[in-house]
Image (tube, rainbow, N blue to C red):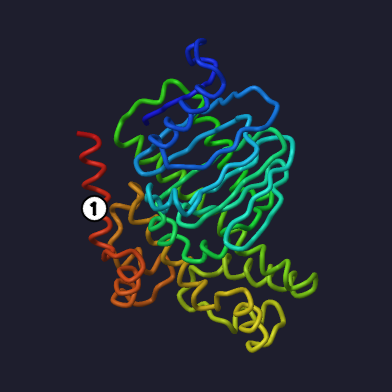
Amino acid sequence: MQKVRFFSEDLPASLDDQGKFNAWLAFYAGFYTTLEIKRAEHHPFFVRFAAAQVAQIRLGRIEGSFSRVARTATAMETAENNDFLIAMNIASTPLFYSQAGRDVTLEAGSAVLCTNAEPGVVEAENAISWMFVGLPERALRKSCPGAVDLIGRAFDPANPSLRQLGRYVSMLLAADDIPDEPALTAHIESSLHDLVVLACDFEREMAPIARMGEARGAQFRGVLAEIKASFLHPEFSVSDVCKKLGLSPRYLQALLTESGENFTERVMELRLQKSRKLLERAASQHMKIGDIAYTSGFSNSSYFNRRFKARFGLSPGEWRSKKNRNLSAALG
């Protein structure tokens, strides 16, 4: 894991505030991407920045006397970077963020999904303090197709995966003894990626509940809980949920469609993600592909193979072989 840091107090004492600020701008552009940054007026310049790169994922923590940080159209032309980022406000005061036509106030502990592919602005009174995790656009779109709808929306500070992501990033940045070993790096990258996806999935579920109102929102939560509890059964169907919750099939489908994903789409995604984890898990290497299909809720291996390849770009067998080759190479 490659780690870097930039503390303004480490710069030569001969540099004035503007010189230190210029050094910071050049450093960050080289590490990640070009930003337009405005210093806080009537405050000495300071910045404390610690970051790491884990394979294709960048993570970091920044505190600085900035009143405005912007990703401009001009910067996008000169520094191509389409990463998605979850940015968490770790200050005790609010931050104000604007992107994709949305303006949000980020209270302490909240976060926002940003994209470097569009202009965006974050503002504060005198200082900005936040933590970020950035991963390639393609990686997040593939794992969480609906994530793009979350751009510019404030995440709930109580989002359990968001809170775990914050703790995990803090631990990684504070540790000085994490070896740059391929198998460990792959594990850390996978964990970060999964936590980002889980945090986005939580927000995608909560957003429809907020729009539905108390009664319909409670019914929606009940439907989701039943789907998650029963999707592994190959014979699981809409009628099972309806009987359990006392809803009509038409109403249930309308409720799910309102959330953006119907019953079939939700069940399919859960089954595919379950099968992917089984294919990657060392303890499941003895299982045949057909057994993994059935264990994940599929009753037909051929159908499972087609849906898995359409979702992840490789057949189940190819996915398992690729993961095994990567692990063997990492272990030497």
Viewport quadrant of the C terminus: top left
- Seen at 53% across and 36% down, the residue is 168
Q: Is residue 192 left or right of residue 285?
A: right
Query: Pointer 1: what residue?
Result: 322
Q: Is residue 246 left or right of residue 303?
A: right
Q: Classify residue 31 by image quadrant.
A: top left
Q: Residue 278 location, x and y as percent?
A: 37, 56
Q: Residue 206 location, x and y as percent?
A: 67, 62
Q: Is residue 265 left or right of residue 126?
A: left
* Crowd rating for badge 1 (residues with CA inside 10 Å; few <14, some 14–19, many 20+): some
Q: Residue 274 location, x and y as percent?
A: 43, 60
Farthest residue in the right direction? 214
Q: Is residue 51 left or right of residue 209?
A: left
- Seen at 26% across and 66% down, the residue is 315
Query: Judging from the image, what secondary structure is the residue with disc 1 in?
Result: helix
Tag count = 1
Q: Classify residue 16 by image quadrant.
A: top right
Q: Determine whether 181 is above or below 188 in the image.
A: above
Q: Determine whether 43 is above or below 119 in the image.
A: above
- Seen at 38% across and 40% down, the residue is 187
Between 44 and 282, the one lying in front of the other is: 44
- Seen at 45% across and 21% down, the residue is 176
Between 235 and 305, the one lying in front of the other is: 305
Q: Determine whether 156 is above or below 214 in the image.
A: above
Q: Residue 301 location, x and y as percent?
A: 31, 74
Tag 1: amino acid: Lys
Q: Determine whether 55 is above or below 181 in the image.
A: below
